[in-house]
Amino acid sequence: MNQVKNRLAAISLLDRAIRLVDDATIVARYTALDDEAKDGFQHLLGVKGQNPDDAAIVSAARTAAAKGRINGDLERIALVLTDACLADCIEALGSAADDPSEGQLRDALPGVIDKHGLPLTRVMLASVVCGEAVASPIIIRFLKHDDDWKLPPAPTVTTAPVVLEKEDSPEREALKAERKARKAAEQEAARRRREQSAQARRRG
């Protein structure tokens, strides 16, 4: 039960963080993607093949994020938006990236915020919490209680209530297994990026 509760709390933090990111930042991050990544992001947002303009990308991203708390789209959108931010944070933390102390995080984050802005850095931190990073308890304290970095109340968004089935069907079980495998793959990819970054620094 505690694991489910913690998971819901982490998703709630990420949802709040993304809703606090302004439209211009979403557009800037989308524009910075290469063509292949843009294609994948459009597919994730459900606008692939529609030749969406900036306004359509923002609208689709916010809609998909609001509906994506259950199916994982919220976390995938966050990963796309904060990939560069996360890479810079990992680089700033150096060998401590896998298990940073509170002091190491406090030293690393100001430079990341200067480059990427506080709202996007908050999304990155909340995304790391959703990925069950070792430093999650420290990051949660930052996002909830630190005067410099805590999340203010997010704008209210009205969404349709989620209706949960009382019994799991074979199709639902297959979907849950697919989501679990996808999450594990995303976490493994993030771990490999951290290892590659650490190896690059050691070679340097």
Image (cartoon, grey):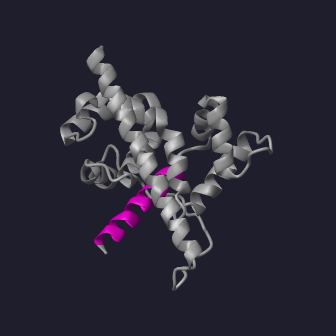
Query: Quadrant location of the N terminus?
Result: bottom left
From the viewer's perspective, tell me whether residue 53 is left or right of residue 18. Answer: right
- Most foreground residue, 143 or 177: 177
From the viewer's perspective, tell me whether residue 16 is left or right of residue 140. Answer: right
Quadrant of res 100: top left
Taking the view exactly as shown, the residue that stands out farthest to the bottom is: 166
Image x and y of residue 73, in percent: 56, 55
For the stretch drawn in magenta, the main secondary structure is helix
| Above or below for 146 versus 168 | above
- Most foreground residue, 44 or 152: 44
Q: Is residue 20 visible?
A: no
Image x and y of residue 131, in percent: 38, 51
Q: Is residue 141 magenta?
A: no
Q: How many marks?
A: 0
| Above or below for 13 versus 201 | below
Image x and y of residue 193, in percent: 39, 33
Quadrant of res 40: top right
- Most foreground residue, 175 or 112: 175
Residue occupying image coordinates x 61% and y 68%: 158
- Most foreground residue, 62 or 83: 83
Image x and y of residue 123, in percent: 45, 46
From the viewer's perspective, tell me whether residue 187 is left or right of residue 171. Answer: left
Q: Is residue 18 magenta?
A: yes
Q: Which residues are magenta?
A: 2-19
Taking the view exactly as shown, the residue that stands out farthest to the right is: 50
Residue occupying image coordinates x 54% and y 58%: 155
Residue occupying image coordinates x 64% and y 57%: 63
Q: Is residue 11 visible?
A: yes
Query: Quadrant location of the C terminus?
Result: top left
